[in-house]
Structures are given as structure tokens and as C-alpha cells.
Image: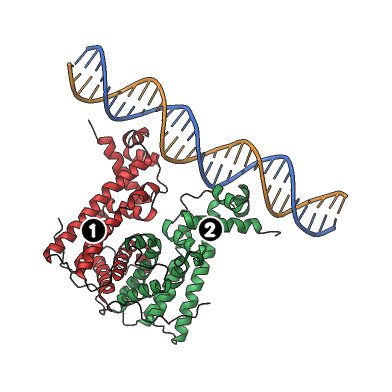
Chain colours: A green, B red, C blue, D orange
Amino acid sequence: MASDHTRSAILAAAERLYADRGFGDVTLRDIVAAANVNLAAVNYHFGSKDELIAELFVTRSIATNRERLRELKAAEEQGGGRAPIEAILRALVGPTLRGCLGPETQRSTAARFMIRASIESVPPIRRIKNREIDHLRKFAGAMRRSLPDRSEVDIYWGLNFALAMAHHTIRESERLTKLSEGKCDLDDVEDVVARVVSVATMALTAGKGEAKAPARALARDAR
Amino acid sequence: MASDHTRSAILAAAERLYADRGFGDVTLRDIVAAANVNLAAVNYHFGSKDELIAELFVTRSIATNRERLRELKAAEEQGGGRAPIEAILRALVGPTLRGCLGPETQRSTAARFMIRASIESVPPIRRIKNREIDHLRKFAGAMRRSLPDRSEVDIYWGLNFALAMAHHTIRESERLTKLSEGKCDLDDVEDVVARVVSVATMALTAGKGEAKAPARALARDAR
DNA sequence: GATAGTTTCATACAACTGTTTGATTTGCAA
DNA sequence: TTGCAAATCAAACAGTTGTATGAAACTATC
């Protein structure tokens, strides 16, 4: 096996470049230049560009999911098999938010890469991504156990909204900062996590079955 | 001016293709093939590919914003300058959701194109997009008038979360359907709108100033 | 119906992409 | 040291991209 040096240099450079600039405009030549290796090295070590991306995604995907499940399991064990909904949501969105936001220095390339992947959806990743549904199902299960009175539909919507708020906040963090003229502090990660968890919790616990009825008659003057 | 036929055929074909497959893998040759025009027509009528995309985006952006502002204005007038927060949020997310979801037949290419644009962020669009902040500021203003007791920070977060839920739901509608095994009906657009508005309203009205404090001590066993 | 201006067309171009090739170097075991 | 597989390298390849060209086909005006 000699030296994996080249191999891992490519992985690191590729992850950073993809995280920063997206899959769209990062070429193999950019990657090998950043990694200080020969152009042919990518195909030699990974077979193709797509396989490089796939390996990157699979590795990171496994790591992220493990982290989330670790937090989930801890929460459920502490509650004797039934975790408080806040803890479940925190396990779902916390790791990603912590990795992608916060002061420059403590942002992880890995988390930012995963966000890119969740946004741009390039072919090699799209193929793998279907497995993520199984992962989300585990959270849906935990949420159902935590809120046994809640309808399944509401659970899924709550899960969807929690992910929505976390991902969108990461993706548009720059715009939110500009829009609020700096008043929204995206560097205070725990505050962001608390806000997302709080709103998602309300979505999941408010009302009782009908989080839909109110004010539906308003503004129906279209056309 | 003779016949704008070629011009508008290109615009229509490009919008549809970009909406369906994204900017990433739609080539000029795909567009001219779909529009049944010659390859050189794009550069003749628009100057360059980027200018074509920009024109598409600007046109649609203006239309969407006009529709949203129309609903907003109607709501504020009806309330005498102060619209209920639900109506404001409905004006913000309604048009986009209605355009992008619902039965296949009534989905608008325009709305789907705008979602693509909001996701992929290709250079010519990124340049224009900064203006959208001014548009969002109008909604922030209306929300502040509607909830004068609320802190500005909370307003911006509520706005952010409302857009988050709407956009994410559209982008991941397929996954949500699969995850919920069809139990979440993405074709019932008004239900989706009501859910998003309802949760965003809760985010904006709950607590009073501190939608953050609860349960922050939980799950702090990381590392 | 000739003419000038606009629009279309087939084709070529230059730049860039991921990938392959075959020679050369490296590292290590016999 | 010798021998051999693994790894690196410069160079070329084939394919695709957006764009440019110049001739041909239109269209309307005089």
C-alpha cells in the first residue's frame, strides 16, 4: 500500500474545493493543482471523477449519520426509550448546523461539503442519496415514540420542516446576515440550533392534529 | 421587429429545460433543439448564454415579486395598513408554493424555474440576486408593522424560516412523499401553504422575545 | 421587381472537459 | 545490486462546450 499520501491529498483538496465552490465549477485540474499531484493521479487512484465524488460523499455521509444517531441513541437511553422531542430534533439538526455555521475557524469542511451535496445533487451522489431515507426513518420512528398521540403525517411534516430550517439557514446564511444587517448572529450556533429546535417543536406539538385550519379564507382574491 | 417567434421559442424552451433539469446539464444545443431553431440563434438574439439566463431570471423575478406584493398590499389595505401576520406570510410563500406544487398540469414552468435559480445559483443569476434583498425588506417591514412588539431579530428569523419551509418543501417534495409513503399529500397545495404559514406564525408569535431558552442544556454530551 | 436590412443556417473554431497512454521514476524484497 | 511491481509524470486524446463566421434565405420598402 506504500504511501496513501497522494490519495488522501486528493480527497482533502477535492472536499475543500467542492465545499467552497460547488461541484459545478471545480475541475479535476483544479483539484490536482490544489493537491500538488499529477492530473492522472485521480483516475489512477479512484478510477474516475464520479467515483472520487462518490467516495467522498459516502465517507462523509456515514460519519454524519453516525454522529446524529449517537446523539439520538443517547437521548433515547436517557429517557428510557422515549426521548423528549427537543432532544431528537437537536440530534437531527445539531451536528450539521454546528459543522456549517459558527466562526470561520471551527467550521468543518466535511459539513460544508455535505451541504453542497445536499444542494447541487450531481449524478454520482443522487444515486447514493436514496439510502438516506432509511436514516431519516429512524428519526421518524423516534419522534413517533416521543409523540405517540401525534398523527404520522404531522410527524413527517415536522421532520421536513426541521430539516428545512436547518439547511436553508446554512445555505442562505450570508443573505440572512445581510438582510438583517448583522442583527441575526449566525456565529452563535447554539442559538441557531435552539431556534430551529424550538420552532420545529412547536410545529410538532401545537394544536393537536389540526395545524392547518386557521385563516385559510384570507387573501383568496387571486385573479 | 418582424417576428419574435424565434426569440420567444428559445425563451420558452430554455425555461422549461432549466426548470426540469437544472442549469448544470442543459446545453445551448439542447435548448435550440427543443425550440427547433438554429444554434446561432441564441447568440444572435441574446448575445450570449449568460444573457439569456439573465433575461429569463429578471423577467420571472419581476413577475413573482409583483404577485407577492399584490397579495401583500391587498392584505395590508384590508387591515388598514396593518395586515395579520398570517396574511403576510401567505403572500410571501403562497405564490411560489402554488406554482411549484400541485397536480402536474397546473404547475407553472416559471415558478419551477425560479426555484432552480434559487438553488443552483449560476453566476449570471448570482449577480442579479442581490436586489432580492430589497424585496424581502418590504415583507420584513410589513411583518414589523403587524407585530410591533416583536424584536427585529425575531422578525428576520421568522421570515427566514418561512422561506426555508416553503423552498425546502418544494425542493424535496419527492423525498417527503417517499419518506412518508405517500401519506403527506404534496398535491394539496392549500394544505401545504396552511402548514407553512401556521408554523411560521407560531415561530413569530410564541413566547415573547425569547423563543430560544428552552431545553438548551439537553444533549450537551458532545465530545 | 430590384435592393437593403434582418434573420436563419451550416459549419468551423478555440477552449475546456475527463480520460488514456506509455515512458519514467520510485520503493522494496530477494 | 538486481528485479519488479507500484506510483508518478508529461503528453496526447476524444468529446463537449459556448461562440464566431460568412453565405444563404427571407422581408419589406421604394
Side of B53 where A96 appears, left or right: right
Q: Chain of mark 2?
A: A
Let me know if residue B189 appears in the view: no
Report how far apart the C-alphas of labels 1 and 2 lie in the structure. Answer: 37 Å
Assign a secondary structure to mark 2.
helix
Q: Position of residue B13 (x, y in %)?
A: 31, 43
Residue of label 1: B95
Quadrant placement of the C terminus of chain A: bottom left
Q: Position of residue C23 (x, y in %)?
A: 73, 40
Task: Inspect the image, locate mark 1, and give the three-letter code of the amino acid beneath it.
Answer: Pro
Return the mark for residue A82.
none
Name which quarter of the figure residue B10 lies in: top left
Quadrant placement of the N terminus of chain A: bottom right
Assign a secondary structure to mark 1.
helix
Task: Inspect the image, locate mark 2, and give the three-letter code of the amino acid beneath it.
Answer: Glu
Callouts 1 and 2 close, C-beta under 8 Å: no
Kindly identify the residue that appears in the image at 44 percent across and 85 percent down.
A81
Residue of label 2: A15
Q: Position of residue A54 (x, y in %)?
A: 52, 58
Q: Are marks 1 and 2 on the same chain?
A: no
Q: Chain of mark 1?
A: B
Question: Which of labels 1 and 2 is toward the front?
Answer: 2
Of B130 and A209, the residue lying toward us: B130
Of D28 and A177, the residue lying toward us: A177
Q: Position of residue A148 (x, y in %)?
A: 34, 82
Let me know if residue A222 appears in the view: yes
Kindly identify the residue that appears in the image at 44 percent across and 72 percent down.
A94
